[in-house]
């Protein structure tokens, strides 16, 4: 098997998301209530960082983690530095505010261009707050790279292609993808627990911050201006429970009772 | 003109004193290799500790046979004083040392004390070689010193007895032993007596000098080191002794202690001070339950031997730290002195001290509390754990899960942080967010918030506080693990992260007084948070409930409860760490029908449940389970219930009861608050 000879340049796109077990939505602003909710690295983005770091450890090279968000998102980048990423870049600007997946992927693509010409761009398959799964593919479109989504394992790394397992329900496809490529990964790639030494080093590291101007992003394509979709309404689904205990002498009578109930509620 | 006797004496004295000074200097130079630590503050307080623990032998006398050491200690001092006239008069017969050589009462006291030393030695020999308790090592070193002390005393008596027989000096009129020995020489001619005096005098002097040389070269270095060790012993409260670590300091590149020279000089002095009495190992739950950790072995053998060996090589090479040698230097050294190079390359953790030993400690502090020479064991363990966790990323796998849970869910159980206040949902308990400057914050702790058993104690406490009209609130979702177990596991980084976040929240709400159920939280909040800017008045719920009853704020109904014998278990973190033994006991005694009884190991000598020092979150695969041993000790008293005061003890002991009690024998483990709540 021809394995890769050259070092790998990798960019990992991550997102800081609220760690929320019970999502609460602000009915007025249509956004998630973040008050008091701790922030974490989006779980599959952590897997993406892990996939990148493993490749770097095997073939050498460099892993750059990239996030778009407010200054506090630096915490998420530091977590990836602690895991073993080499550099962290935060793109943070009011111009990015209110971006949908299209504008977000445009901004991230511009930042990646500013980083250089990576061989691989890793993303998590989707973020747990928006759940769209569109940003990774969006980046690939903006940069004109090949892409494979829902990757559960990177099998082989070659100079000009990767062999990856793309998961689907009940199995996987084996895909050969030409480099440079955007790969989005699922949660199968278990992220490591960073060493304490790594965490301390990361907590002291400088995070490079770029503005929209720095990455030469066109103002009309970022943030709210560049968004082609808009969230009209977000709401908590109303959960209606209906339960009733039926009593009957035998199975036959119980079945009749049950069918009666269903008919009553127009289920049948 | 110098007499021949004086010349010979001076030559021998010079040789002996030189050998003594040489050996001592070697030890001091080794101590000087240790890291810096300021133990020179508060000389008054230190002198007081010296008086109590050295001159009065305070810590030794906590055990009844400590009196043996008291006799030997004071006897030794008087014998040494008596050497001054004894030696001088032997050299210059006409000289009489004022007081020491002339006062009959001095000789009376010296005779009494010398006799007590003799008795003490006999009891000591019987204990060590006939009774043979496990904690005493029957070594040649121990035997040699007994023989030397005996020989010193007896040759002195034989000489002085002959002196009395030859010429009854008024100074010896009250010295009953001297006079008894004089009786042995009845009928001897003055010439013979003169010869006897000469012979025994020389024997005595030679043994004395031998002893002098032996002390710094053997475990009896204890004699020289331990008085200083008591003086330099820590002055901090029991719960506030963990060494500071400034994680922001850029100069800090290696965390914890992974090389013996990274211990402070005081930590090294501990090893020299150990007298091998074995009180530590006799009370160490890890040692008793068959784990490889033995606190006595660790200090007096493992670390000491390594220190002497490595320190000697380092001093020979003229280096202060093994890191000063580059890889090339070491390769070079291997060629010239292979053994020295090997010694320098030994790993403190792994080659000298095993990881099984390191992780067996429950930080129960029994060793340190009972150590008569004020050795500080627990910090050494934590320093070495820090090295393993923070530097080497090498620690028991189970701990990683607990660390992860703490980072993401802020509790070691890994239950969602959002469920922290669920235990209180049916109680009308306010959170700090909604309450207006309540008098107390009720710090519930992770166990009290997430563990089903401990939640019941939280509920009982809240109900009692409400019944007494205490103005309190909880933090609810804003509370995070206090960080006790991660700190004891050596993860100082995660501890400081938790501590700083909690302190930020507490200070933001201007919290002054904190009530807590958990002795671990109690200790951390009270003793460890001040270092990070969190200064709170912390009170254990059992203390507060006592106070509320005393102040008449909590009225208890005289309810009918079953007659029961409750055997009480002191938690380490409320007992040894805070010296609070009475508050929980007092509450149990207030409950109708309760007869409170003690286990054999209680108060200062209480036996750990096995859950401290992060052991709660680790597997216990070696030896017996510590909690099972404690439950056996409890069940031996045939109780109907076991009383406790700590959520971790309750969990550990309940597990033990499941293992050790008959299934039909229902022995619950209770917090006193649960019984008091029944009387509301």
Image: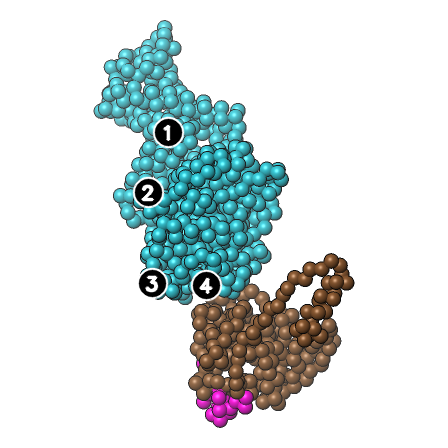
Secondary structure of residue under mark 2: helix
Give the residue at mark 1. B70
Q: Are marks 4 and 3 in contact (CB under 8 Å)?
A: no
Can you give x and y, in whole percent of width and height, for residue B441 in the image?
37, 57
The subunit carrying tag 2 is B
| Residue B72, above or below B545 | above
Q: Residues within 10 Å of mark 1 (few under 14, many from 20)?
A: many
Give the residue at mark 3. B436
Work out whether mark 3 precedes mark 1 in sequence or the reverse, and give the earlier one.
Answer: 1
Q: Residue furthest right?
A: A252
* Residue A154 highlighted magenta (yes or no): no
Residues at marks 3 and 1, CA–CA distance in whole angstroms: 58 Å
The residue stretch that appears in magenta: A209-229
Give the residue at mark 4. B477
Q: In which quadrant of the rendered view does residue B499 lie? A: bottom left
Give the drawing colour for chain A. brown
Q: What residue is at 26 percent from the left and 18 percent from the top?
A: B104
Give the residue at mark 2. B550
Q: Nearer the viewer, mark 3 or mark 1?
A: 3
Q: Is residue B442 shown left or right of residue A260?
A: left
Given residues B390 and B418, the one toward you in this image is B418
Residues at marks 1 and 2, CA–CA distance in whole angstroms: 42 Å
User: Do discs 4 and 2 share a chain?
Assistant: yes
Secondary structure of residue under mark 1: helix
Work out whether mark 4 precedes mark 1 in sequence or the reverse, and give the earlier one.
Answer: 1
């Amino acid at each position: 098997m021809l394995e890769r000879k050259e070092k790998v340049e990798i960019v990992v796109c991550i997102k800081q998301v609220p760690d929320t077990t019970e999502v609460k939505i602000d009915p007025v602003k249509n956004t998630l209530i973040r008050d008091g909710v701790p922030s974490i690295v989006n779980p599959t983005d952590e897997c993406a960082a892990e996939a990148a770091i493993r490749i770097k450890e095997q073939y050498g090279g460099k892993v750059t983690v990239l996030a778009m968000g407010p200054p506090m998102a630096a915490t998420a980048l530091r977590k990836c530095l602690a895991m073993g990423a080499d550099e962290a870049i935060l793109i943070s600007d009011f111009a990015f505010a209110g971006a949908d997946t299209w504008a977000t992927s445009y901004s991230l693509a511009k930042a990646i261009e500013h980083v250089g010409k990576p061989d691989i761009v890793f993303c998590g398959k989707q973020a747990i707050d928006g759940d769209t799964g569109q940003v990774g593919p969006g980046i690939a479109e903006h940069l004109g790279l090949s892409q494979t989504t829902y990757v559960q394992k990177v099998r082989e790394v070659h100079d000009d292609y990767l062999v990856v397992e793309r998961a689907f329900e009940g199995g996987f496809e084996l895909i050969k993808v030409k480099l440079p490529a955007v790969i989005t990964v699922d949660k199968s790639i278990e992220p490591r627990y960073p060493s304490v030494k790594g965490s301390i080093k990361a907590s002291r590291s400088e995070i490079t911050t770029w503005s929209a101007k720095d990455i030469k992003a066109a103002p009309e394509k970022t943030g709210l201006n560049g968004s082609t979709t808009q969230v009209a309404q977000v709401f908590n689904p109303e959960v209606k429970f209906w339960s009733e205990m039926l009593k009957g002498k035998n199975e036959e009578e119980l079945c009749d009772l049950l069918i009666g109930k269903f008919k009553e509620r127009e289920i049948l | 003109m110098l007499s021949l006797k004086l010349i010979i004496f001076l030559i021998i004295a010079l040789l002996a004193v030189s050998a003594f000074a040489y050996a001592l200097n070697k030890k001091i130079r080794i101590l000087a290799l240790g890291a810096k630590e300021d133990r020179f503050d508060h000389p008054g307080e230190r002198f007081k500790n010296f008086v109590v623990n050295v001159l009065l032998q305070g810590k030794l006398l906590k055990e009844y046979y400590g009196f043996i050491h008291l006799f030997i200690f004071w006897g030794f001092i008087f014998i040494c004083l008596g050497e001054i006239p004894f030696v001088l008069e032997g050299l210059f017969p006409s000289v009489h040392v004022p007081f020491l050589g002339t006062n009959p009462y001095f000789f009376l006291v010296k005779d009494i004390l010398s006799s007590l030393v003799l008795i003490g030695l006999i009891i000591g020999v019987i204990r060590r070689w006939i009774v043979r308790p496990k904690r005493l090592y029957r070594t040649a070193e121990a035997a040699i010193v007994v023989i030397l002390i005996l020989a010193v005393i007896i040759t002195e008596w034989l000489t002085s007895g002959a002196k009395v027989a030859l010429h009854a000096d008024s100074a010896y009129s009250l010295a009953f032993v001297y006079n008894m020995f004089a009786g042995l020489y009845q009928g001897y001619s003055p010439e013979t007596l003169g010869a006897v005096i000469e012979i025994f005098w020389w024997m005595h002097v030679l043994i004395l000098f031998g002893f002098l040389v032996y002390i710094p070269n053997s475990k009896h270095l204890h004699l020289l080191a331990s008085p200083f060790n008591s003086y330099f012993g820590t002055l901090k409260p029991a719960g506030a002794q963990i060494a500071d670590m400034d994680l922001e300091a850029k100069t800090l590149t290696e965390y914890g202690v992974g090389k013996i020279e990274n211990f402070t000089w005081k930590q090294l002095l501990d090893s020299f001070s150990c007298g091998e009495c074995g009180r530590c190992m006799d009370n160490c739950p890890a040692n008793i339950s068959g784990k490889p950790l033995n606190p006595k072995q660790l200090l007096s053998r493992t670390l000491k031997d390594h220190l002497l060996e490595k320190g000697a090589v380092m001093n020979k090479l003229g280096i202060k730290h093994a890191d000063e040698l580059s890889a090339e230097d070491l390769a070079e050294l291997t060629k010239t002195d292979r053994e020295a190079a090997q010694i320098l390359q030994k790993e403190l953790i792994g080659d000298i001290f095993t990881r099984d030993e390191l992780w067996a400690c429950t930080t129960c502090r029994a060793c340190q509390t009972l150590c008569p020479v004020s050795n500080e064991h627990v910090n050494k363990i934590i320093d070495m754990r820090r090295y393993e966790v923070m530097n080497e990323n090498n620690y028991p796998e189970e701990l990683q899960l607990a660390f992860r849970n703490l980072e993401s869910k802020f509790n070691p159980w890994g239950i969602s942080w959002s469920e922290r206040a669920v235990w209180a949902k049916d109680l009308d308990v306010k959170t700090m967010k909604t309450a207006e400057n309540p008098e107390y914050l009720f710090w519930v702790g992770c166990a009290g918030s997430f563990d089903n058993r401990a939640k019941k104690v939280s509920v009982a406490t809240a109900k009692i506080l409400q019944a007494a009209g205490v103005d309190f609130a909880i933090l609810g979702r804003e509370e995070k693990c206090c960080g006790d177990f991660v700190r004891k596991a050596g993860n100082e980084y995660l501890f400081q992260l938790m501590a700083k976040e909690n302190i930020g929240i507490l200070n933001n709400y201007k919290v002054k007084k904190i009530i807590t159920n958990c002795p671990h939280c109690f200790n951390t909040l009270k003793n460890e948070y001040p270092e990070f800017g969190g200064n709170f008045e912390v009170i254990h719920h059992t203390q507060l409930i006592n106070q509320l009853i005393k102040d008449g704020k909590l009225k208890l109904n005289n309810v009918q409860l079953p007659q029961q014998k409750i055997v009480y278990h002191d938690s380490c973190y409320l007992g040894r760490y805070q010296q609070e033994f009475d508050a929980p006991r007092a509450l149990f005694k207030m409950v109708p029908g309760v007869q409170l009884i003690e286990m054999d190991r209680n108060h200062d000598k209480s036996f750990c449940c096995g859950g401290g020092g992060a052991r709660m979150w680790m597997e216990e695969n070696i030896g017996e389970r510590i909690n099972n041993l404690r439950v056996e000790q409890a069940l031996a008293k045939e109780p109907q219930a076991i009383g406790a005061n700590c959520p971790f003890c309750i969990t550990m002991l309940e597990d033990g009861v499941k293992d050790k009690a008959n299934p039909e024998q229902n022995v619950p483990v209770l917090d006193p608050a649960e019984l008091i709540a029944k009387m509301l």
